[in-house]
Amino acid sequence: MKTSTSTRPPAEPVASNTAPTVTGRGICHSFGEGELKKQILFDVDVSIYPGEVVLLTGPSGSGKTTLLTLIAGLRDVQEGQLYVLGHELHGATRDELVDVRRKIGFIFQAHNLLPFLSVRQNVELVFELHPNVSVDEATERADKILQLVGLGDRLDYMPDKISGGQKQRVAVARALVAGPQLILADEPTAALDGKSGRAVVDLLQSLAREQGCPVLMVTHDSRVLDVADRVIHMEDGRIVEPAQ
Ligand SMILES: Nc1ncnc2c1ncn2[C@@H]1O[C@H](COP(=O)(O)OP(=O)(O)OP(=O)(O)O)[C@@H](O)[C@H]1O
Ligand SMILES: [Mg+2]
């Protein structure tokens, strides 16, 4: 008999006996000031465990990207607790936030490639946050990951000379190149055809399985639902039980 009226995340995580990579409790977030202030996230609880692939779904404007950018340390936490890779982000200093970002691979909803840098240089750029990696090693690692996503023959192309799907794959390569401990992916397959989209999610899933690197992925793409260990559904800034 179902008696629960909870609005908390649906399925239990696969590895609840290990420490979570992400724990958010009571996260609220607003944009704007004064009379224009608008609350976007309401009391969001979220946990992501090592090795799992979690899909984040929900209508446009429900707060998915906002939540992802908070977890990534790209926005200041206003209310609630948010632990990511052992750091408490609420009240974290700039240096701590940079430290967290260095450990996260973020695939943006818009691919955000720098137009004046080549495919290879866009990926190498990640190592600006990793001063211990030499220029030669950065190039070697960028080339290797670009081969892996099928762009080995486009290394020196400029972004305006490659297709939308190829740009998205550069963005995936950029997120993976530094060996992240958490992947946050905002609709990584939206601009891809079925085959390329599949290749990207398979790559993300194998990273989760083989290296324990959890993946939190926003998607509307019904073709990739099967990679999910869990689905978190958001509506109007709240996490709700998904329709069964
Ligand atoms: N920087 C901002 N300033 C003001 N409002 C914002 C800002 N970013 C997002 N919003 C608003 O917050 C709400 C949630 O936006 P968010 O981008 O998180 O939605 P989403 O679930 O990712 O939507 P989509 O599926 O369309 O990408 C929207 O109403 C949006 O207009
Ligand atoms: Mg979004």
Image (tube, rainbow, N blue to C red):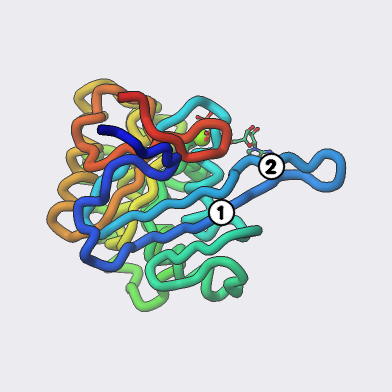
Who's the residue at 54% across and 55% down the image?
Answer: 26
Q: Residue 89, percent across and down? A: 53, 67
- Mark 1 touching mark 2, by CB under 8 A? no
Q: Is residue 80 above or below residue 206?
A: below
Question: For residue 193, which numbered disc appears in the image?
Answer: none
Instruction: Kindly report the distance in space between the C-alpha atoms of the residues bearing marks 1 and 2.
Output: 11 Å
> Disc 2 marks which amino acid?
Gln
Identify which residue, 77 or 234, lies in the foreground: 234
Queried on whether the Cβ of the residue with tag 2 lies below 8 angstroms from ligand 1, the answer reads no
Secondary-structure class at tag 2: strand
Q: Report the side of 123 relative to 33 (left or right).
A: left
Residue 155 in sight from this viewpoint: no
Residue tagged 1: 27
Within 10 Å of disc 1 (Cα), the crowding (few <14, some 14-19, many 20+) is: many
* Residue 216 seen in this snapshot: yes
- Vertical position of residue 123 compared to residue 198: above or below: below
Question: Front-most of 103 and 218?
Answer: 218
Residue at 59%, 45% (x, y): give it: 42
In which quadrant of the rendered view does residue 179 lie? Answer: bottom left
Residue 240 versus residue 113: which sits nearer the camera?
240
SS for tag 1?
strand
Q: Residue furthest right?
A: 35
List the residue tagged with mark 2.
Answer: 39
Is 14 drawn above or below residue 189 in the view shown? below
Q: Residue furthest left?
A: 210
Residue 202: horizontal and vertical position, in percent?
18, 39
Identify which residue is drawn at 42% across, 44% down: 8
The quarter of the picture showing ligand 1: top right
Three-letter amino acid code of the residue under disc 1 = Ile
Q: Residue at x 34, y 52 (%)?
A: 183
Q: Quadrant of the N terminus?
A: top left
Q: Which numbered disc flags the more N-terminal residue, 1 or 2? A: 1
